[in-house]
Image (cartoon, rainbow, N blue to C red):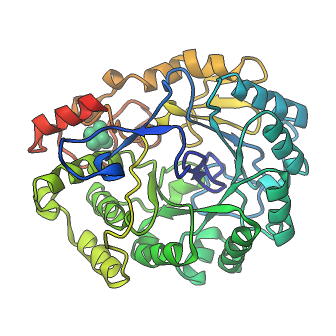
Amino acid sequence: MNETVDGQAAAVPGGGAFAPASGNAGGTGAPGGTGAGRRSRPVRHVHRDVADAPFIVIWEATRACPLACLHCRAEAVPERDPSELTTDEAVELMRQITAFGRPAPLFVITGGDPFARPDLYELIGRARELGLAPAVSPSATPTLTADGLARLREAGTNVISLSLDGATAARHDDFRGFAGVFGRTLQAWQQARETGLKVQINTTVTRANLMDLPDIARLVRDRGALLWSLFLLVPTGRGRSLTSLTAAETEDVLNFAYDIAETVPVKATEAHHFRRIAVQRHILHAHGADHVTGLGLGSLYRTLLRRAVHSGLVRASRTRRPPIDVSAGRGLVFVSHTGQVSPSGFLPLPAGDVRERPLTEIYRSSPVFTALRDPDRLAGRCGACEFRTVCGGSRSRAFALTGDALAEEPWCSYVPGSFPYPQELARLLRRA
Ligand code: SF4
C-alpha cells in the first residue's frame, strides 16, 4: 500500500494520503499584521463541520499487492481476498459517501494495489457519475503502465499518488523489497504527468532515509508534483520492524519541512504537530525571534537545512501551503477492503461495517469517532497542551505504541505551556 493523497490518501494500504492543492478548506486567521494572503494562515480548517462530514474518505479497494514494502500498514498479500467488497457493494459505498452532502468528501482508492481489481476503471466511472472525484494510489508494480495511467485518466481520475522513499534506486528498492521499483516509479511519474494526471509523491520518513530527504525534495521540485507528503511512520503492520525516530529528530524533520514549503508543496501525514510547528514558526517570525533557539532544534535540523539551502530549496519564491486541520476520525475515515470502518488505515479501531450500517451513521455517531473528535478526552501531555485543538497528536501512533488511542503523541517533544507567546497564540486559536 502507498500513502494517501493529502485531502486524498495515496496508495498506502491502510490509507495513503492524497491532498488537494486547494479544496473545501479555509484558513485559521493569524495574528494581526503578520504577512498577507496564505502566509497569514498558518493552518487551514475545512469549511464543513468535521463532526457532520469527513473531508476525505479512503477506501482500501483490495489488499492484493505483489510488493513487500517495509512499512506496509496493510501487510499486503499477493492474492485478492474473496470477501472484498464486490463491484455493487463498492458502488453502494460511493452512494453512502455522497449522502454526506455537498461538497462531497475527497475519495481516495488505495490498496494494496488498486490495479489488482479488474473493475477499477468501471468503479472510477461510477464514482464520477455519482459526483465524486476519485484519486487513486497505485503501487509501482508491472501493472503500472502508460496505458493503465491513460485509462485511469479517461475513466475520470485527476490525481494519483506514488511512493518515493529514497533518492536513489538502492535506497528506494531496498525499502520496497524489489529491484526496479525506483525506475518504474520515476517512469510512471513522467507518464502520469504527460497523460494530464496530477501526481502526489509520498515519502515515509525513517531513520534509513533521513539524509535523502533534501534530495527527494529536489526531485519533487524539479519533476513537478501536486504535493509532497512526508509520512511519519506509524509502527503498525510491517512498519513495526522499522527503527523509529526520536521525538527530537521528528521536530528537526518537521521544521526542515516547514522551511522548504515555499519551494516544494509539502504536507505532513500522521504528523499533526506539524500544525503546532506552523503556528509557532508563524508567531516567532512575527516577533523576529530565532526559531532554532526558540524551538530547541538540533544538529539533524542544521544538516538538513544546510543541504536544502545548497539545493536552492529555501527561498521565499512561492506561497506557503498551510497544513490542513484534519486527523483520524476528525475529517478522515477509512473503509477496509471488506467494508470495515475505522478512523484511519493506521488506527485499526473497528467502528462499524458498511455492509450493515450506513457510513454516515458510523462516522457521525460511533463512540470511536466521537471520542476522537473531543480534544478534552486526550490524555498525558496532549490533554494538557494549549495546541491540542489545532494539533492533538497522531492518534494512530499513540494507539500503535501504547494501545490507547487517546494517549499522548509519543513522537512530540513539546512541553505544554512552554511557548513564550501565550496571548498571541490564544488570539490566533480563537480565530481558528
Ligand atoms: S503535546 Fe500533543 S497536542 Fe501538544 S503539540 Fe505535542 S502532539 Fe500536539
x, y percentage for residue 102? 63, 27
Q: Is residue 323 left or right of residue 255?
A: right
Find ligand 1 in the image and state its quadrant: top left
Q: Is residue 424 left or right of residue 374?
A: left
Q: Quadrant of residue 148?
A: bottom right
x, y percentage for residue 229? 50, 58
At horizontal 29% and vertical 54% (from top left) the residue drawn is: 247
Residue 205 shows in this picture: yes
Q: How many marks?
A: 0
374 versus 181 height, above or below = above
Observer-nearest of 15 and 52: 52
At horizontal 41% and vertical 68% (from top left) the residue drawn is: 207
Q: Quadrant of residue 226?
A: bottom right
Residue 178 shows in this picture: no
Quarter that holds the N terminus:
bottom right
Observer-nearest of 13 and 92: 92
Q: Is residue 165 left or right of residue 266?
A: right
x, y percentage for residue 205? 45, 63
At horizontal 71% and vertical 43% (from top left) the residue drawn is: 133
Q: Quadrant of residue 2?
A: bottom right
x, y percentage for residue 236? 54, 48
275 versus 205 height, above or below = above
At horizontal 75% and vertical 35% (from top left) the residue drawn is: 131
Quarter that holds the C terminus:
top left
